Amino acid sequence: MKEKNRDILSALVLIAVSAYGLYLTCEIPEPFRDYDLGAAFLPRLVLILIGALSVLKIVVTLVENRPDFLEKKDTSQFIKGFGTIVLVGLYCFCFRPAGFLLDTVVYLFAQILILVPKEKRKIWKILLIDVTATVVIYLIFTRGFAVRLPQGFVKFF
């Protein structure tokens, strides 16, 4: 299948999914107060953005004038994308048993290793960013928003 056809088909699927999602959000009850956004606001916003970006993708694909035979397939991008999907799956699977802190530190470290080019990798910088971001996010959610995150077998704070 040509690249253009695949882009248009995936955009049409996303438009259909967002339209169905918008239909489903009609069943969410409206807020009691006038100044309250309600539970349906954010899902509707995300679904509208997905639909609008999909329409934009179709327009850009139709306007774009590139011959398909000149496209070079880059397998490194595929490997990075697949690696990211695997990491997110492992992150979700290990979230409760390992806890937020340990799971997020390991996930971010591996994700940065996948995405940063080999010549720009500095382990000390990756670890510094990784641990700092994890602790800051943990403190924002636990102290600022009072959200209980799973501690797993590592108990801090």
Image (cartoon, grey):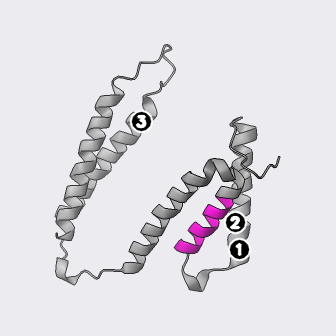
Q: Residue at x 17, y 64 (%)?
A: 5
**Residue tagged 2:** 129
Q: Earlier in the sequence, mark 3 or mark 2?
A: 3
Question: What span is colored magenta in the figure?
Answer: 104-115
Outermost residue toward the right in this view: 157
Q: Earlier in the sequence, mark 1 or mark 3?
A: 3
Question: 129 and 27: which one is in front?
Answer: 27
Q: Is residue 97 left or right of residue 5?
A: right
Residue 26 falls in image quadrant = top left
At mark 1, the secondary structure is helix
- Residue 43 image label: 3
What's the magenta bit mostly, secondary-structure-wise?
helix
At mark 3, the secondary structure is helix
Say what amino acid the circle numbered 2 marks: Ile
**Residue tagged 1:** 125
Q: Are marks 2 and 1 in contact (CB under 8 Å)?
A: yes
